[in-house]
Image: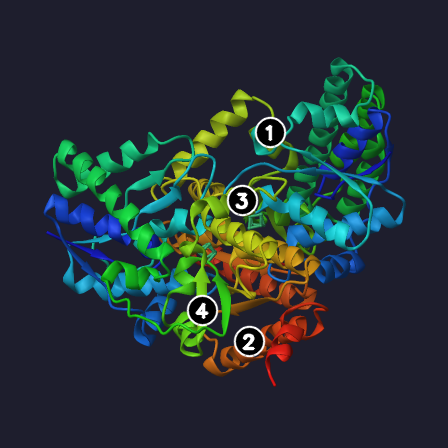
């Protein structure tokens, strides 16, 4: 059995670690390139949302490298993600690719429980071993997310352009490839040290921009055209509303802290959106309100074309923008999204946000 | 007190229930006119571009009703059966309308959420009774009575009437002697909206083609179609479409071809249409997807319909001519 999985930001590293620690032969999909997007778009329905297409691209490229089993998420939500895997299986089948798809989802989703699916993956291993491997993967993911979060904030102030990116590359290699707690701790220590000794413009007061929106677009850098890095280079401190480990904490493991945060977000969204609308539409609204209340300078919503929950959120964001006087823009991306167009829009937005801050007397803008 | 009912979205499914419900409660109820250009345009201006056409049309109907009513009925449809949903956009629709910056009357927007069981209905009824200032008991009783109405309408639908005909008793006798039988599938507010669908049902009927839609099928047939799926679908609207589609694909004698009419950018249909097309292709069953939005022109639709009808007809002729011991020989034996 040669197992593969779809990419999604730092989740890919955690997934690889989990599967390898289960002593499976893992064929990670090659990094997402234009070819991935092209393959995905070619073999997926035209109007489906972008994450679906990228998944298909990942699967095809991994199968080319010899994968024969795909691990995919599922569920029953009002949104499309829950039915992704079903159609993806049909597509791969029609392409004549012999693969076995293991869909990890709660038991009520389809016939056959979650457990029987996991046990397909963990041939002959104890429950204890599976749990331990998952716990390790969770730590690894948290480690990487922590680094990512710090770099999102620091990039705006680095004195040597590219030094944050260098640390991130190093972190992917060291933390991402750790397979034991010992290696993980050592790698984290090294990276923390590098971050601590990063040379920064300390006098700068960068603009603060919050990123909200559909989770896959928020977290997969190749697909969002490196949005966070771009903003960093424009001199902006980036606050992402969610990371992979947040997502796992909120949805997969019972975690009181995460639950409290979720409740706070939902409360904040109440005046604008009465309830859940699938995906992360409600979170987009709630997090935007929290950002605005926290005095952020601007908010950017990212969503894939035709994303239903985010379209609802998009319709409501103007009310929040008006109420708190925060500029908000929406970026709708698909596989044709061009870097040049995005860069222009971001520059214009950052300029506008900067000018507003000067106007409000909040200090000097740091956009270079 | 007067409640306005927008002739949009799930009106095409639940109107008889609402009408009877308001009548029993003694609440006046008026309906917006059939969708026209003005309604569509005013709606499209009031919501974000990215929204699908049915949502824009619904907004237009709400605006059209605004001057005349005290409340507009826009239920927040989450789910009408356990573990099944409608559509994320409809879950957000009341809030989208409230925050569109337009002048609208207050919304009568009970949460209809039975995803966790039918007791969700109780909450919807309580909300409604409070909003309309009617007693809870009479609300429940009226609701109970109006359920019977739905069963009565279903019989009419199964007899081949469209929802509009069944709701308003406007069905006319049609001549027998049909050329073909074609299934037109899609969400009811796409298939029956006169403007969005460009009257596809009547257009086909006018050519002597018998049209059957998902609503005209008994529910058992829909379940039979759905039993083909590995994983249960969790969207009620898509269950009708895909259930009917798979049923027809596997009972090829029932219809000669399938047309799937969907709105551009519909999230559900992007998956479901593709799934159905794959099944149809494997069985070599004639299938066409028509995607419409507020900008689509009539000419394109007509051309594609004609082409499809021709293919279907050609296929039937071919099948007759080629069948080795079919009616082909038989018919020639009879002619001098
Ligand atoms: S949330 Fe958006 S991107 Fe995700 S499955 Fe739903 S429609 Fe697609
Ligand atoms: S089901 Fe499709 S057409 Fe209907 S409201 Fe949702 S996205 Fe629009």
In the picture, measured across the screen, residue B308 lies left or right of residue A281, that is right
**Residues tagged 3 and 4 counted as in contact (Cβ below 8 A):** no
Q: Nearer the viewer, mark 2 or mark 4?
A: 4
- Are the residues under badges 3 and 2 in a single subunit? yes
The Cα atoms of the two marked residues, 3 and 2, are separated by: 27 Å
Q: Residue at x 34, y 53 (%)?
A: B13
Task: Indicate which disc, 3 or 4, sits on the residue closer to the N terminus.
Answer: 4
The residue beneath circle 4 is B210
Query: A67 or B13, which is in the foreground?
Result: B13
Task: Indicate which disc, 2 or 4, sits on the residue closer to the N terminus.
Answer: 4
Give the secondary structure at mark 2.
Answer: helix
Q: Which label is found at residue B309?
A: 2
* Residue B182 visible in the snapshot: yes
Query: B246 or B89, which is in the foreground?
Result: B246
- Are the residues under badges 1 and 3 in a single subunit? no
- Dot 4: chain letter: B
**Residues tagged 1 and 4 counted as in contact (Cβ below 8 A):** no
The residue beneath circle 1 is A106
The residue beneath circle 3 is B224
The Cα atoms of the two marked residues, 2 and 1, are separated by: 44 Å
In the picture, measured across the screen, residue A316 lies left or right of residue A350, that is left
In the picture, measured across the screen, residue A203 lies left or right of residue B114, that is right
Q: Which label is found at residue B261?
A: none
- Are the residues under badges 1 and 4 in a single subunit? no
């Amino acid at each position: 059995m040669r197992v593969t999985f779809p990419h999604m930001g730092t989740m890919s590293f955690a997934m690889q670690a989990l599967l390898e620690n289960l002593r499976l032969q893992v064929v990670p999909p090659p990094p997402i390139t234009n070819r991935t997007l092209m393959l995905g778009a070619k073999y997926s329905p035209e109007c489906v949302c972008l994450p679906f297409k990228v998944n298909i691209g990942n699967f095809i490229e991994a199968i080319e490298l010899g994968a024969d089993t795909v691990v995919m998420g599922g569920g029953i939500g009002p949104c499309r993600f829950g039915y992704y895997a079903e159609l993806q299986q049909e597509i791969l089948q029609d392409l004549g690719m012999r693969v076995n798809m293991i869909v990890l989802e709660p038991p009520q989703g389809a016939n056959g429980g979650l457990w029987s699916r996991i046990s397909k993956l963990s041939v002959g291993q104890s429950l204890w071993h599976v749990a331990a491997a998952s716990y390790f993967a969770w730590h690894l993911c948290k480690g990487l997310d922590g680094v990512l979060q710090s770099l999102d904030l620091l990039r705006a102030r680095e004195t040597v352009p590219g030094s944050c990116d260098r640390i991130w590359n190093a972190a992917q290699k060291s933390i991402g490839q750790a397979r034991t707690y010992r290696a993980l701790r050592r790698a984290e220590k090294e990276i923390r040290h590098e971050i601590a000794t990063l040379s920064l413009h300390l006098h700068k007061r960068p603009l603060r921009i919050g990123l909200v929106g559909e989770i896959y677009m928020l977290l997969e850098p190749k697909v969002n055209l490196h949005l966070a890095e771009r903003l960093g280079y424009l001199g902006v401190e980036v606050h992402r509303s969610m990371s992979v480990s947040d997502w796992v904490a909120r949805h997969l493991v019972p975690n009181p802290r995460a639950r409290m945060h979720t409740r706070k977000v939902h409360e904040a969204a109440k005046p604008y959106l009465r309830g859940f609308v699938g995906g992360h539409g409600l979170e987009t609204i709630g997090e935007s309100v929290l950002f605005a209340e926290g005095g952020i300078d601007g908010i950017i919503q990212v969503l894939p074309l035709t994303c239903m929950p985010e379209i609802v959120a998009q319709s409501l964001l103007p009310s929040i923008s008006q109420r708190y006087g925060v500029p908000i823009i929406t970026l709708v991306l698909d596989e044709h999204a061009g870097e040049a167009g995005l860069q222009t829009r971001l520059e214009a937005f950052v300029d506008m946000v900067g000018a507003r801050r000067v106007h409000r007397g909040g200090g000097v803008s740091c956009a270079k | 007190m007067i409640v306005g009912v927008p002739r949009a979205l799930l009106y095409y499914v639940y109107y008889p229930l609402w009408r009877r419900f308001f009548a029993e409660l003694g609440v006046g109820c008026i309906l917006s006119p059939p969708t026209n250009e003005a309604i569509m345009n005013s709606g499209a201006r009031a919501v974000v571009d990215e929204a699908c056409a049915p949502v824009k049309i619904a907004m237009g109907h709400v605006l059209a009703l605004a001057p005349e009513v005290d409340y507009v009925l826009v239920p927040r449809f989450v789910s009408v059966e356990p573990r099944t949903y409608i559509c994320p956009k409809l879950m957000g629709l009341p809030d989208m309308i409230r925050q569109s910056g337009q002048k609208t009357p207050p919304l009568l927007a009970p949460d209809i959420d039975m995803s966790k069981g039918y007791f969700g209905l109780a909450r919807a009824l309580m909300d409604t009774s409070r909003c309309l200032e009617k007693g809870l008991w009479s609300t429940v009783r009226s609701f109970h009575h109006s359920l019977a109405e739905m069963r009565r309408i279903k019989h009419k639908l199964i007899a081949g009437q469209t929802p509009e005909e069944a709701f308003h008793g406007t069905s006319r006798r049609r001549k027998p002697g049909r050329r073909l039988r074609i299934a037109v599938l899609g969400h009811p507010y796409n298939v029956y909206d006169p403007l969005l669908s460009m009257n596809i049902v009547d257009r086909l009927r006018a050519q002597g083609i018998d049209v059957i839609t998902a609503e005209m099928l008994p529910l058992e047939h829909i379940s039979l179609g759905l039993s083909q799926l590995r994983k249960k679908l969790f969207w009620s609207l898509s269950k009708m479409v895909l259930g009917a589609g798979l049923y027809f694909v596997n009972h090829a004698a029932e219809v000669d071809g399938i047309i799937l009419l969907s709105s551009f950018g519909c999230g559900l249909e992007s998956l479901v249409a593709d799934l159905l097309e794959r099944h149809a292709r494997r069985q070599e069953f004639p299938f066409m997807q028509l995607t419409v939005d507020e900008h689509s022109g009539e000419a394109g639709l007509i051309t594609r319909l004609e082409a499809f009808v021709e293919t279907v007809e050609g296929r039937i002729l071919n099948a007759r001519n080629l069948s080795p011991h079919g009616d082909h020989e038989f018919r020639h034996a009879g002619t001098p």
